[in-house]
Image (cartoon, coloured by chain):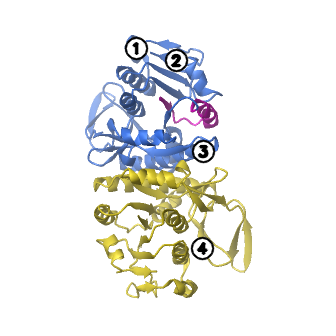
Chain colours: A blue, B yellow
Amino acid sequence: MILIKVGGGKTINWDYIAQDLSELLKKEKVIVVHGASGIRDEIAKKLNAPTKTVVSPSGISSVYTDEKALDIFLMVYAGLVNKKIVALLQKYDVNAIGLSGVDGRLWEGKRKTNLYVQEKDKTKLTTDNLTGKVEKINASLILLLVKNEYVPVLCPPAISDENEIINTDNDFAIAIMAKAFGVKKIISLFEAPGMLKNPKDEKSLISKIKKEEIENYLKFAKGRMKKKLLGAKKALDYGVETTYWGDGRIKNPLKNALQGKGTVIS
Amino acid sequence: MILIKVGGGKTINWDYIAQDLSELLKKEKVIVVHGASGIRDEIAKKLNAPTKTVVSPSGISSVYTDEKALDIFLMVYAGLVNKKIVALLQKYDVNAIGLSGVDGRLWEGKRKTNLYVQEKDKTKLTTDNLTGKVEKINASLILLLVKNEYVPVLCPPAISDENEIINTDNDFAIAIMAKAFGVKKIISLFEAPGMLKNPKDEKSLISKIKKEEIENYLKFAKGRMKKKLLGAKKALDYGVETTYWGDGRIKNPLKNALQGKGTVIS
């Protein structure tokens, strides 16, 4: 089984992904996890509730999710984007079925009620944040679908142990799934050729990162890249052999990633 | 198996429904189908694309679904409302899993490209309407979930035979599902005690409608009620013995409906 994560940027080409996926499915079982941050930010603006990003005291940025932001999140991730991806995959004969982490308690975690936010020199405590980390998954539901030739297309949010809907980090949820299914390979596609030395220079690709080097890279990684690295590290801790990062905008995104044309973390 | 349809009005009480449902599940398999028109209309207004209703030459009203309206539809039905219902049912230990008709080609139909719309004395042809009628269902997917103790919570849109996402009529989709599974009982909950002689007088409840009387009632039924009646007729044609209409706002909505306290159509 291969886990495929696709970022939520607007220039990701799902037709290219679907083409590769229908090939890949001839020899592998696959689970797809997607984001939708690009369109989410757009809709949030239109609804006069622009996305707010906060930074933790340790420097990790995340989206601030109050009730209004969560509603928009549900609309865009589990509704608009998930179902459009499913319909597109169906066009390529990929028998996709879209689910959020809420469905059948697919992704379950604890709500992190207290969130410390760094604002310049001050650390502020917030308590209305509807987020949490996935701690367990409904493995039997995923296996039921995969064994019956469906391709699960998953997205956040997750559900808390107290039945609240909570926003959650995709990379972390993927690491937990990798552990549950003994997955050896993860592919992660986004709007860049891979990890870049200089985020503004697409030619500054880092081709290989060894597990023991991740700590070093964490020091100069920024924003989302930091989260991706932490997720990749977690996945390696959980028995994954290789995480392939690749470009989700170009033709043959999955093939290229698996051939090591992006960043290979192992 | 019982099919339960719940309307999309804002005063529907899902806690009451969930309480009854967790009882009902002790002796019956259940599929839930829900609407979300109330919240959809609200969000559509906020996004400056208010819901447009059109009337066919035969007097049946429906929502006009162009691309923008479909996006909003996806957001509210398959995203916001479907997942909130799933999380609420989970709270009552109902192992709900939310799916749209697009997922795994659950509801498939033909897109009705040409739609005739009555505007005062004129009949106008429109061709950008993304709607269609469900003609076949993925019965094996539903059975797979039901046999494994999940409660499918379904909503439109559906998928066309050419992989377009299409808005569709819930009542008709339910009739098709009833036929596929040999269902004998359908419960339909909405924001009224049942079919009313006078829509403005909740005490004017019609307790019983026989199949052969439906034609008569169709003459004076208005708007959505007309569609509901047509759906109920279709279901009876397809072998359903009884459709129970009931109040989705009050305590014990399912029990009351099954006890014939709303409108019983058989």
Q: What residue would you read off at disc 2?
A: A263
Q: Are marks 1 and 4 in contact (CB under 8 Å)?
A: no
Q: Amino acid at mark 2?
A: Thr
Q: Secondary structure at mark 3?
A: helix
Residue at the disc numbered 1: A211
Q: Earlier in the sequence, mark 3 or mark 2?
A: 3
Magenta residues? Answer: A1-25
Residue behind mark 4: B61
- Amino acid carrying mark 1 in the image: Lys
Residue closer to the observer: B72 or B16: B16
Dot 1 falls on a residue whose secondary structure is helix
The amino acid at mark 4 is Ser
Q: Residue under circle 3?
A: A90
Q: Whole-percent x and y of residue B52?
A: 59, 66
Tell me the quadrant of the picture where the N terminus of chain B can be found: bottom left
Q: Is residue A9 magenta?
A: yes
Q: CA distance from mark 1 to mark 4?
A: 61 Å
Closest to the observer, B196 or A46: B196
